[in-house]
Structure formats: C-alpha cells, structure tokens
Image (tube, rainbow, N blue to C red):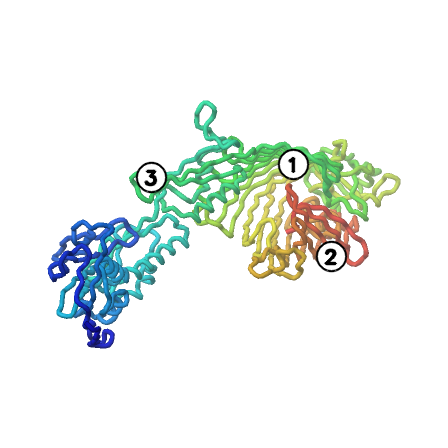
Amino acid sequence: MARNFKRLSSRFNGKSAYLLLALPFLSFSGVSKASPENLNSNLLVRNQENIGSETLWDTSIENNTVEPRRQLLIAEDNSEEDDNQVDTKVLVSEVVIQGLEDHPDKKRLEIAAYDAMTIRPGSKVSRKEVKRNLDLIYSTGWFSSVRIESLNGPVGVQLLVKVEPNPILKKVEFNNSRRHLSNTKIEEVFNPDYGKTLNLNILKIRIKELKDSYKSRGFSLARITGPTRVSPNGIIQLAVYEGIVDGIEIQFIDQEGNIEDESGIKLKGKTRDWVIERELSTKIGSVFNRSKLESDIKRLYGTSLFNDVKVTLKPVSGKPGNVIIVLGITEQRTGSLTGGLGYSGAQGVFGQIGLQETNFIGRAWATNMNLTYGEYGALLNLSLYDPWIKGDKYRTSFKTSLYLSREVPQEFRSQDGGSIRGVTDRYNAPNSLTSYDTNASHNLDINNNNSLVNTGPFSSVSEAKFSASQFSWFDYEGDSIVLERTGGGFSFARPLNGGDPLKKSLWSVLVGANFQKVEPIDYAGDKRPYGVASTNFIDNKVPKEEVICVGYNCANENTLISFKSAATYNNLNDSRNPTSGDYLNIGIEQFVPVGNNSPTFNRSRLSYSRFYPVNWLKFHKGCRLSSGDQLNCSQTLGFQAKVGTIIGELPPYEAFCLGGTNSVRGWSSCDLGVARNFGEATAEYRFPIWKLVSGSFFLDAATDFGSQSAVPGKPGKLLEKPGSGFSLGPGAVINTPVGPIRVEAASQDFSGEWRYNIGIGWKF
C-alpha cells in the first residue's frame, strides 16, 4: 500500500493530533494478535516522583480531594518475554494529546508534551519505544500523571497520550521548623513561578537555589526534600533538615596521634574543657554552620595553647541530619625558660632571664617571672594575665603585676648636655638661728623660690620658721641618680561586644590602679633627694639655686597611687603588620594623695593611627599583579599623631619623654625633651622587598609646646634638650621566628647627625 500522508493541521494550531494513512498495523512484541483489546492492555502510567527525596507520592483522600500518588505503577502485559524475541513494531497513524481541554496553559503544555516525544505519525514503534516516550513526556516536569493508550483504527494505530498537568502553583510551605530560611528568601525564589503551572524541573532549580543560599551562609548540612505533598489547589510542601549539633566531644591526642594511653585509658589534657568550649560559638542544639566552626577553630589556634585541632562529624543514630562534633585536640608545650642579651636606652646593655607559663593550671592564665640586669639598672617583675575571666559573658580580662626596679631615669640624662648627678644634704649656713634637722617638719622647696613645704608634723610652731639664708651649699658627689621603684598594679579590660563574647568588637575599655613607692638613690643605695646638672658645680660645692629636687617635695621617698582608664578603637586589618584601617587610644591616669609626699596630678594621652593601602614600589612579586594572580602586597602609607598633657603636682621623673625608638627616632630615649605637654606626628611608607624583608621611609616630628620650663626643676632645660625637632630616614624590618626586628637610620633635623636604632616590631 502506498504511503499517502494527509496532514490535518499545522503543528498544534488549535488542534491536538496528526493523522496520516499508514501501512497495515503490526502487533507489539509479546502480543499474538493485533487487536484493540491487546493494544489497550499495554497501558503505561508514570506518576510524579519526589524531587530530592526517597519517598514518592501516595493516593489518599483528604477533604474530598485526591492527593498526588506516591506509588509508581507501570501496567503492562505480564506475559513473559524471551530476551531474544523481536519487539514487533507497528505503524502509528495518529498521536492525540488529551487532558488539557480546559487548562489555561493548554497550548504551551501540548507543545511541551509533543516536543518531548520522538514518536511521530508515520513512525514505526515498538512497546519499548512507547515506554521511553512516556518517560520523556514525564521528564518535562509539567505533568503529575502520563498515560498512553493505543487504538486500532482503519488506517493504523492511534496513540492517545492522556496527561494530567500539575496544578497552578500558589504557595510553598514547609512541614517542619526552619531557623535560617526567611519568608523573604522563599518569596524571592518562588515569586517568578506563582500563578503558573508547577514544573518539577523548575522546582528542582528553585530548591537548589534555597540549598545554595544555605551553603553560602555556611549551613553545609542543610537538606531540602520534597515535595512531600502537592495539593490540587497548588500548595506544595517541602521538608527542611538544617543539621542540628547534637553534641560536642573533646578528645585529647598526644604527639603520636593516640587518644588512649598504653593501658587503654582515655588521655586527659592539661587544658580545662570549659577553656575550649568558651571559644566555640557552635553550641549544642544549634544549627551546624561550617563557617562558624572554622572561625571557632581559628580562635582555638589563636589561644596559642594547641598544636593541632582536628574536626570530625559523627552522625546521630535515629536523628537524620543531626551530628556530634568531635574535636581532636593536640596541646603544645606552654612553659618556657628564656634568656638573652640586649640593649635599651633605659638599661643600657642588659641581660635577661625569664620563666613563662601560658596555660597555668589549665585555665589559660599567662604567668611570667622576669629578671633583667643592665648597665643602668635592674628589674624583677612578676605578672599574671587572665585573658577571659571564667563565666564572664563580656570576655573581661584581668592583669596584675608586682615589680622591683632600679633604673637611671631618662629624664635626667642627655647625650650632649650631661646628666643630673646626686648631691648630699645641705650644709648649715653661718649664723643660722637653728641647725638644720633632717627630721624637721618643714623644708625648702628648691624648685619653687625656696618656699617652705611640709615634710612632717611639728613639735612647735616656732620650728616652722626657717628662711632661705639658713641654707647655702650642697656637697656634689657626682654619682648617678637611680630611681628605686617598688609597687604593683592591676587592670580589667573589656571589649564592648554587647554581651556576645565571641563578637568582634571595635571598641574596648580598660580600668585599673597602680601603686608604687619611689626612692631616689645612688648605685650604693644611699638617699639622693637632690640633684644638679653635671656641668654646674664649683669645687664640689653647689649653690642652692643650681640644685633641683629629684622627687616631689624634695622627699627621700614618694608614694604614687593612681587610677587609670582607657578607651580603644581598633579597626586595623592586621594587628602586627596593618595595611588599612585605623586605631585610636584615649588614656587618663589620675594620681591621688595619700600623704605629704604623695603628689596629685592628672596625665592624659591620645594617640591615633591611620593606614592607607598603596602599591607604588613593586620589588616584591606579590605586588606585580599578573593575569589570574591575586594581589599579595602588604604595602601601606601610615600616619600617627599623639598628644598629651599633665596637670597638677608633677614629679619630674613622671614627665613626658620626647625622642627614642618609639618617638622621634633621630634622638635617643628622652633626649629631645622632658615636657609637661607634647605633640608628636609620624608619616611612614612601608613596602615588602623580598620574602621576609620589608623596607620603609619615615618622617617623625615632635614639640614640647614650650612646656619644658613648666616641669619642676626644669631638667630638660638644664640638660639643654631642644624640646622640638624632626627626623627622617630609611628602615628595614626582618621577620624572624621571635618577631619582626626593625633596623633604622634617622637624622637629627638636617644637622648631619644620624642615629641608628634597633627595635622590635613596627613603631605603630
């Protein structure tokens, strides 16, 4: 029979079928006789499967509505087929798509179903090809049910494709609680699909968007399954399993990787469990967050108590999605004995020995005993630091120390102008009315026009009547004045974190108190309450107008009690080598009197630093950006400004010092000025050179605002300290295992004088 084709309509222009004249009908494989009955028995039904879930739909009746079916049915000829039997093909005369007659999206769904099929009128098909086309139609995602029936017509086999479209999507619900998936995000994802026929493939994409939203925020265990239910009125239900932390276990691991000793007993660590747990923002019962856990691990490393931290997630039986976090902790040695030689402006050449423990009694306390003995003095210091007081939700830290020191005060030394040297007590003047009594209740304030000052109780009023003429000469000894300080202090510091101890806080505050006894002595330990510039003496006798008081009130001993407070703003990107951000520190210290020889004064300081990232010099390969490379160039332009003032009864050894490695670098420590007020500014350009080496160019400047004369005794003026100056020069920093070492050459103004510095770390 000739193949004469007759097309009844253009492709789905209002019609739903193609008709053609075909060859006589051939039976399907496994069917002995071609008949409508046999063909109709080959019914293929595919119901909607679950997306991202292990469950399928169910057939149920709720409120007179039939819910989507969960069971997969493929009704077909149950007769056994020989694998070698030929699957007979038949000629299709017509393909009719049914079930969309009243659907508002009829045209698009008809095209989708037809385009998905490979069977066309005039095709010879087998039963397997019909099954495959059924799957193809269903795979479009538009239909909840697909059925293909066959009818034997006068000119060939007619295929009836009966489809049941998904409902119009109206709403998305979740059948369990969700903590980190907002309604706003759900609406944002599904809003383009509301009012349209539900497509399961598009639904998969939308679910993936929700999963990606979870993943981008660190919720890597979150799972979205479903739909678990699709109602005829277009409401679909999804299930969310975010992944709950069911427990946190801490295991201590030795250096060989063992968690048990030779006896099979679980290893115990030195560190208390609560020291570890308080660093974790991940809590039992919270939703697992990978990013948060990574931050927790970084904080644990930041304590410097652990060599290694391994994380294992252990599933919880009977609780899908829940996990137990197992932390494998390897502790590091926290005790150390240190020693070495060094040089400083205050101590000269010195030797140092120290004993440190950074995890005292397993509570992360840092203890330190340090002994320094140098060319100009010695220091014994005992300190304890608790970085986080147990149970404090604000992460308050505590620090305390006790010390005994002897040092030559830098305020009384000058590189070019000599130094303040000691003199003994005064001689009696001729024809004095009273002999000088070191136990007398009044004495002369040499630094204040020889006025009388109280030094103790009187036995009678007449004993207080002295005059300047009674005293005339001091005996010049020429030995260095040393300040012996005995005291201690404590402080509490707290970040302003709003009660979240793990929240990064830009602001922090500090309060504390210090107490010390200060005695001016010589190297032999004899009292030296008076001093004179080493250039101003005659035959070992010094006129009284040349003598200054070393301490407050010309006393042999001063008692200093102070209360201090400070506020700090820190927005630096790196505390050790910042390249951007700013830093502000405001400090106030109030000294209060506790006796006649205890001064009252206030010392206030302000410091501000700012860094701007630049990329001017490209010595380091990380500063030469190539295609596909990431810039790795710690290059910056930094600025710092500092001001300070002192109001009240100032002992000269408590004045501000200008000059030194951390001040104006062209002068040695305190050699630029001894001031009651000061201002200082620095500009510095830092750039990497090669691996561990960085370079810098700097400009420092400072002024005493003319306040050296306002310091009692005027030690800065006596020692001919300039009071103001600037320096510039180059420097280099070498990063070593013990920290960055700074080497610099700095000029004194433009005088041609240069000073070479060695310091630890950047200046600011």
Q: Which residue is mark 1?
A: 517
- Residues at discs 2 and 1 in contact (Cβ within 8 Å): no
Which is in the foreground here, disc 3 or disc 1? 3
Residue in front for this viewpoint, 677 or 261:
261
Vertical order, 214 against 118 (above or below): above
Q: Which residue is mark 3?
A: 316
* Residue located 11% across and 60% down the image: 37
Which is in the foreground here, disc 2 or disc 3? 3
Q: Position of residue 523 (x, y in %)?
A: 76, 33
Query: Mark 1: which secondary structure?
Result: strand
Query: Mark 2: which secondary structure?
Result: strand
Q: Quadrant of residue 652?
A: top right
Q: Position of residue 60 (x, y in %)?
A: 15, 53
Residue in front for this viewpoint, 716 or 162:
162
Q: How many marks?
A: 3
**Residue 148 in view, yes or no:** yes
Please state if 761 lies on the left or on the right of 421 as rendered: left
